[in-house]
Amino acid sequence: MNKRILAAAVLGSIGVAAHAQSSVTLYGLIDAGVSYVNHAGANSKSLVKYDDGVAQGSRWGIKGSEDLGGGLKAIFTLENGFNSGNGSLSQNGREFGRQAFVGLSKNGMGAVTFGRQYSLSTDVLANYTTGGNTVAGNYAYHINDIDQLTSSRIDNSVKFQSANFAGVTFGALYGFSNQAGAFAGAPGATGSARTYSFGLNYAAGPIGVGAAYTDIRFPAGQAGIPTTISNATVPSTIKELRTFGLGARYLMGPAAFWALWTNTRLVQLPGTGSTNLVFDAYEAGAKYSFTPALTAGLGYTYMHMADLTNAHFNQVDLSLDYALSKRTDVYVVGAYQKASGHNNDAAFTPVQAQIGDSTSFFGPSGSASQSQIAARVGIRHKF
C-alpha cells in the first residue's frame, strides 16, 4: 500500500512539473477616444469623430512557451488587431494581422521564429520615436509610415533575434516571396514581395542607440505601398522600398530624450521612368514624469520628400498622460503640421499636410490644406 501511495505521489508531482513548464497568456489593449481635426479630407472641413487606436492600436493576443529542457523553449504569438468603434478586424481583415509566429528560443543565444512578424526597423527604431515613447502614438509617426517604424509586418518570414550580450542585441529577418520562379520577388502579383531586414541595438544604463535597415522588393505585394503621399501620386512601378534609420535615447531621472533620422527610397523598375521618391525624417523629443502617474511629452519632426515632389513638413506633437492604475490611463494629445513645396508635375501642385501614419484618421486624402491641427482625448486599458 505504501509503495502504491509513493508511486501515485511521484506521478502526481511529475504532472505538476510538466504543467508548470508550459504557459499560455491572454493579453490585449483597447485604445478609444474622441478626436478633432481641421482641414480634413478632400473638402478641408473640420471633423469630430470617435477614433480608435491612436496612442496604440487596439489588439488582443495569445502567447505561450513550452520548456523543452536545457534552456530551450518552444514559443508562439498570435495577435489580432481590431477597431473598438465597430468591432471590425484591422490589417485588412486578417484574423491575426498584427503578429502570427512560432519558433524556438535558447537561453544565452536568442530565438528563431517563423510567420508574420515585425521588421527590425519597427523592432529597433520605434524605441527612438515620439510615437513610441508618448501617447501621441500614431499621430506622431511619419506620413503613411513610409519608413516602416510602426506597422512593418512581414509575411512568410524567418527571423532571428539575439539574446542580450552586455546591452547589445541584434537581429535579421528574411521574408519569402512564395512565388514560383520568383525567389527574389516579382512585380504585379499579390504576395510577391521579397524582404530582408537587419537591426542592431545597444541599451545599458541611461543610454540607448540603435540602427536598422529594411529592403522590400516589389512592396505592393507585401504591405500595399500607398498610392499617394501627401497629394503626390506614387508610381505603381516601384521595384524596391529601402529604408535605413539611426536613433538614440538618453534617460535622466524622470526625463527621457530621444532623436531619430530615417532615409527611405522608393526606386522604380528600370525603363519605367526616373521619378523615384526620397524621404528623410529628422525627429527629436522628450518626456517628463512630474509624478509616477502624470507624464508630459513633446516631439518635433521635420520631413522632406524629393524627386517625385519637393515637399517639406514640420510637425509638433504635445501629449499629457495620467495613469489611473497600472493598466488604465487617460490622455490628451495635440499635433500641428505645416507643409510647403510642390509636386514635380506639370501644374506644380502644392503639397498637402497629413498628420499621422495613416490617412484613415482624417479621411481618404488626409487634408486639402497645407496646415493641419489634430487634438484628441482618449482612454487606454491594458489587460
Image (cartoon, helix red, strand yellow):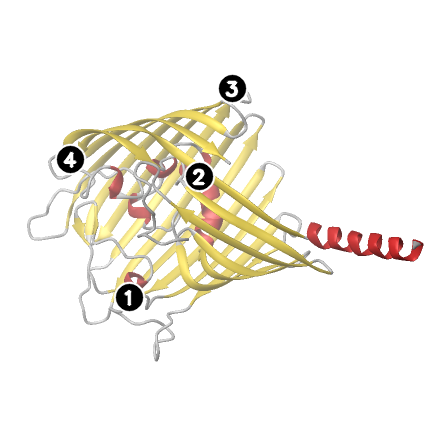
Mark 3 and mark 2 in contact (Cβ < 8 Å)?
Answer: no
Q: For marks 2 and 4, give the CA distance.
A: 27 Å
Tell which circle, 3 or 1, labels the residue nearer the N-terminal end: 1
Answer yes or no: do the residues labelled 3 and 4 have beta carbons within 8 Å?
no
Quarter occupied by residue 38: top left
Report if the CB atoms under discs 4 and 1 are less than 8 Å apart.
Answer: no
Numbered circle sitting on residue 247: none
Picture quarter containing residue 108?
Answer: bottom right
Three-letter amino acid code at disc 2?
Answer: Gly
- Across the whole image, how many numbered discs are drawn on residues? 4
Q: Residue furthest front?
A: 1
In the depicted structure, whether residue 285 falls above or below residue 3 = above
Considering the numbered disc 4 on the image, is that residue within a helix, a strand or a loop? loop
- Give the residue at mark 3: 290
Q: Nearer the viewer, mark 2 or mark 1?
A: 1
- Where is mark 1, residue-wise? 190
Query: Gap between marks 2 and 3, in whole Å?
Result: 19 Å
Badge 4: residue crowd in 10 Å (few <14, some 14–19, many ≥20)? many
